[in-house]
């Protein structure tokens, strides 16, 4: 067995106040045929980044519906994660050298994981490229296609994927029974699969990251980090990753400060175990900060966890997600759910979440980012209205209950003829 991630308990019924009883009832009906079915989600890391965030809610909710769901993480090594980070970058469009030695290390490590995987699953969902080749080592086993439906969930924007790296992964992906993508635009034309599904990720409104917090509490938290709660706060929450463009945010903020001298910037970013690039990017941002005390560079190494992120997002006058490429960008929905307007890079899933001029603004450059931040800081009433619209947009489209219904519908299609749970003793 791979390493099993410990889960919190969650109950679907608790979401009734947020999404309404009819939605909860519909999900229950969708789940009924899958009572007792065994579902395994596999990804590369138990914390840090959006996939971990999603699974921490999705898997407990499957369990609350009587489905025997688990989340397990791959065992890697520094070398493996460094290679898969290169793969991630290449699939988002970076030019990398994809050597045979990298391919060998990748496949050897996936083989080790395949050998460790237990069987007896009805559905296995593998997330992103790290575990994408698992099924190729298991095809002739019981857990291969004979008794288990395999689904590949791609969280990455592949519109400009490096062709060599994508062609390496494509045959592995195509062995799956279905693939799930955040946006239709992300699916490469070359992908030859019968079942290709589009379903954006979502946030958990009741998680510690998103639940309501009293403003005095948020004020105290920000103070603890040396941030002045009475001055305007501009904030970006994201891993320290070049695609999230933290240096670009910092440059935009320096322009903002010329017009709004009391503004402060908070860059909060966690370090993920499968992301060795993080520490290098952190140093680049620290250098660009040049000791400016109005720019707060914070991470999980400063005990910045879900509560602090929640508080920073609530205290911000403007949230920023200036990504250059973005699979989805959960941080955008997180901010909108808290009624904050968002200035986002015109990239991938951010364009699904920000409706230009309604929930915030989409930008293509440092200068545009600065000018939109200035507009929003200068217009608190308009900002509030945008935030309120954004919250409803998230309620309608980007909450975990919608995602739950999407997955149950897909399971239903895949196991159409005979619900697997009915065949189990
Ligand atoms: N996050 C966090 N602490 C940080 C930075 C990020 O908890 O210091 C969370 C953030 O709130 C969001 C997730 O990590 O829930 C990032 O997901 P997103 O889809 O925005 O980006 P990804 O990291 O998956 O590219």
Image: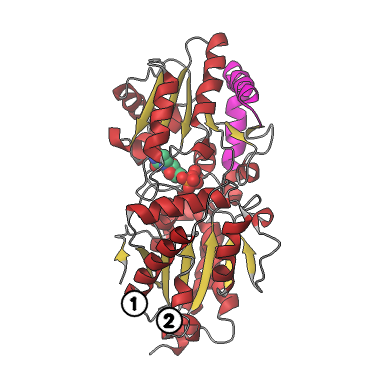
Q: Is residue 422 above or below residue 37?
A: below
Quarter holding residue 177: bottom right
Q: Which residues are the magenta region?
A: 364-392
Residue 45 is a magenta residue = no
Q: Secondary structure at mark 1?
A: loop
When asked about the image quadrant of residue 294, the answer is top left
Q: Is residue 269 at all visible to an observer of this figure?
A: no
Left or right: where 303 falls relative to 250: left
Residue 374 percent across, percent down from the top left: 60, 18
Q: Residue at x 51, y 45 (%)?
A: 330
Q: Position of residue 370 (x, y in %)?
A: 60, 21
Membership of 368 in magenta stretch:
yes
On screen, residue 308 above or below 164: above
Q: Which part of the image, by quadrant, shows the C terminus?
A: bottom left
What secondary structure is found at the residue carrying circle 2? helix
Q: Kindly identify which numbered label has been placed on residue 118.
A: 1
């Amino acid at each position: 067995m791979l390493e099993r991630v410990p889960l919190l308990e969650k109950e679907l019924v608790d979401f009734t106040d947020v999404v309404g009883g009819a939605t909860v009832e519909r999900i229950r009906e969708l789940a009924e045929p899958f009572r007792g079915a065994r579902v395994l989600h596999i990804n590369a890391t138990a914390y840090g980044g959006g996939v971990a965030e999603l699974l921490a809610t999705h898997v407990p909710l499957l369990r609350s519906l009587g489905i025997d769901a688990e989340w397990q993480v791959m065992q890697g090594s520094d070398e493996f994660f460094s290679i898969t980070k290169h793969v991630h970058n290449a699939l988002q469009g970076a030019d990398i050298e994809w050597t045979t030695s990298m391919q060998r290390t990748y496949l050897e490590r996936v083989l080790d994981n395949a050998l460790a995987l237990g069987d007896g699953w009805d559905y296995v969902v593998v997330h992103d490229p790290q575990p994408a080749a698992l099924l190729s080592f298991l095809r002739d086993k019981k857990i291969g296609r004979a008794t288990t439906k395999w689904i590949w969930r791609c969280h990455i924007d592949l519109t400009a994927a490096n062709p060599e790296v994508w062609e390496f992964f494509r045959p592995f992906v195509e062995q799956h029974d279905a693939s799930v993508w955040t946006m239709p635009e992300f699916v490469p034309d070359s992908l030859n699969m019968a079942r290709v599904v589009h379903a954006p990720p979502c946030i958990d409104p009741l998680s510690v990251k998103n639940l309501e917090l009293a403003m005095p509490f948020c004020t105290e938290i920000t103070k603890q980090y040396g941030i002045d709660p009475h001055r305007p706060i501009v904030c970006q929450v994201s891993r320290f990753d070049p695609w999230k463009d933290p240096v670009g945010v910092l440059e935009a903020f320096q322009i903002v400060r010329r017009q709004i001298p009391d503004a402060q910037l908070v860059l909060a970013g966690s370090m993920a175990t499968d992301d060795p690039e993080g520490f290098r990017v952190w140093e680049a941002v620290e250098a660009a900060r040049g000791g400016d005390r109005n720019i707060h560079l914070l991470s999980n190494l400063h005990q910045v966890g879900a509560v602090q992120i929640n508080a920073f997002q609530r205290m911000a006058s403007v949230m920023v997600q200036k990504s250059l490429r973005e699979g989805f960008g959960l941080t955008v929905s997180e901010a909108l759910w808290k009624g904050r307007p968002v200035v986002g890079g015109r990239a991938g899933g951010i364009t699904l979440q920000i409706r230009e001029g309604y929930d915030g603004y989409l930008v293509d450059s440092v200068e545009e980012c600065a000018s939109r931040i200035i507009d929003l800081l200068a217009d608190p009433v308009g900002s509030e209205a945008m935030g309120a619209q954004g919250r409803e947009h998230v309620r309608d489209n980007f909450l975990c209950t919608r995602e739950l219904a999407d997955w149950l519908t897909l399971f239903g299609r895949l196991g159409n003829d005979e619900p697997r749970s009915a065949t189990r003793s």
